[in-house]
Image (cartoon, rainbow, N blue to C red):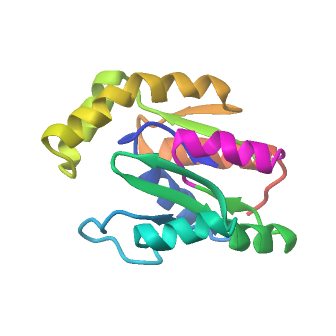
Amino acid sequence: MISGPSGVGKGTVVRRVLELDPSLYYSVSAKTRAPRPGEVNGREYWFVSEEEFDRMVERGELLEHASMFGHRSGTPARPVEVKRAEGVDVLLEIDVQGAAQVRGRVPDSVLIFLEPPTREELVRRLEARGTEHGTDLERRLARVDGEMAAGERFDHRVVNDEVDRAALEVMAILHGYGHTA
């Protein structure tokens, strides 16, 4: 599982890891926000209504779920369970809130915290991506320190200073747990 603060580049590193090792199964999360430009339903996320998300929670269909920045996100449990039963390694990209829930339900999960080279670089990335403005950006920036502190609870920490290097470090960690491409 890869987690880290908003804007650290989780999606970019995960995409590179999947290019390096297509045998990994990428678990697509459900989100209640609208797609950003270029995002495709079922590829980056399953975009669902608030009502459908409520039903998923009520039916116990989510491995983890959390509210962040005005929307909710969660990992559908069934695809993860099926792939693990088949012996396939599953890669999750989730926020720091969800990581603790997954660890509770899947004790043998490997938690990798992706962190920026500096706090200033993280702020620069959040501002540069241009997906949030004004109050939305301020809310994300206000959570940076708390999200960064969460890294202490993870099995491994990887600095995302350069995408290819960070992805190779993630691969080395996975290999250390017996995953082979």
| Start-end of magenta stretch | 93-108
Residue drawn where x is 79% and y is 56% of the image: 179
Instruction: Assess whether residue 127 is covered by the magenta stretch.
Output: no
Q: Quadrant of the C terminus?
A: bottom right
Q: Position of residue 21 (x, y in %)?
A: 63, 64
Say which quarter of the image contains residue 82: bottom right
- 27 or 180: nearer the eye? 27
Q: Is residue 95 magenta?
A: yes
Residue 67 horizontal/vertical position (percent)? 46, 48
> Can you say whether 109 is above or below 91 in the image?
above
Left or right of 14 on screen, residue 171: right
Name the main secondary structure of what is drawn in magenta.
helix
Q: Residue at x 63, y 65 (%)?
A: 58
Which residue shows up at 52% across the image and 66% down it?
A: 54
Residue name at image x 51 percent, y 45 percent:
95
Q: Where is residue 128, by image quadrant? A: top left
